[in-house]
Amino acid sequence: MKAAHPRRNSKREDLIKAGIQEINKHGIAGFSMRRIADDCGLSCGAPYKHFENRKDFIAAVIEYVNGQWRVRQQELLDQYAGDLRRQIVEMSVGYVEFLMEHPHYRSILMLKDEEFDNTYHRLRGELSSPTQQLAQQFFDSVGMDDFTSRRKVYVVRSLIFGAVILMDNGEMAYNQETLEFIRFSINREFDLP
């Protein structure tokens, strides 16, 4: 039996992928649905068959990127089920891998634009929600106070984003040895007072 509207889903995904490239090249301010349609070889009205308007299109791009990370998060959660600390460490290292393996997603994940409204912030916030929930469960399980837990989250996030920047500019190699170093550093943070 044929799936309903397989072309529609494919065109929508093609438009979203082109939207990611559009944001990478031109940012939110320069985001052009007409240019995206042209890049996909479609009429300028084609995006409106899949997205209500520009904001809906950008929200779909953010949701698509979130969905890609959610799949990887779930794999890590399942692989290390029952060990909160290990889940946090592996999700952190997994995020480094995700950012390095999908550099075109970084501009979406780190978007900051005055034009953003609460919808965009909510969508982007959903990306880190499972990790934040795990961290809070871990902190509660070991009786960690609020100040210390916030400090540890700050350090771990700094390790993640700092490592990506260092690897991206060639100061560190993106390889298993470096990932082990990051894993060790993040894990060690949970042993420190």
Image: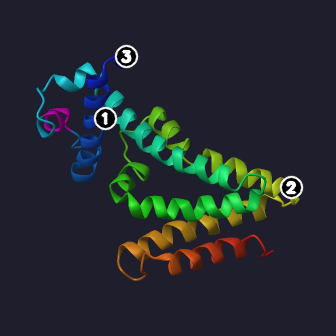
Taking 59 as reference, is 186 left or right? Answer: right
* Amino acid marked by disc 2: Ser
Q: Is residue 127 magenta?
A: no
Residue 98 tag number: none
Q: Quadrant of the N terminus?
A: top left
| Residue matched to label 1 | 13
| Residue matched to label 2 | 141
Q: Magenta-highlighted stretch: main secondary structure?
A: helix
Task: Write the start and end of the magenta stretch as one range.
Answer: 32-37
Asked if 80 appears above or below 52 in the picture, the reply is below
Q: Quadrant of the C terminus?
A: bottom right
Asked if 158 appears above or below 17 in the picture, the reply is below
Secondary structure beneath label 3: loop
Taking 182 as reference, is 30 left or right? Answer: left
| Sooner in the amino-acid sequence: mark 2 or mark 1 | 1
* Amino acid marked by disc 3: Met
Taking 27 as reference, is 172 left or right? Answer: right
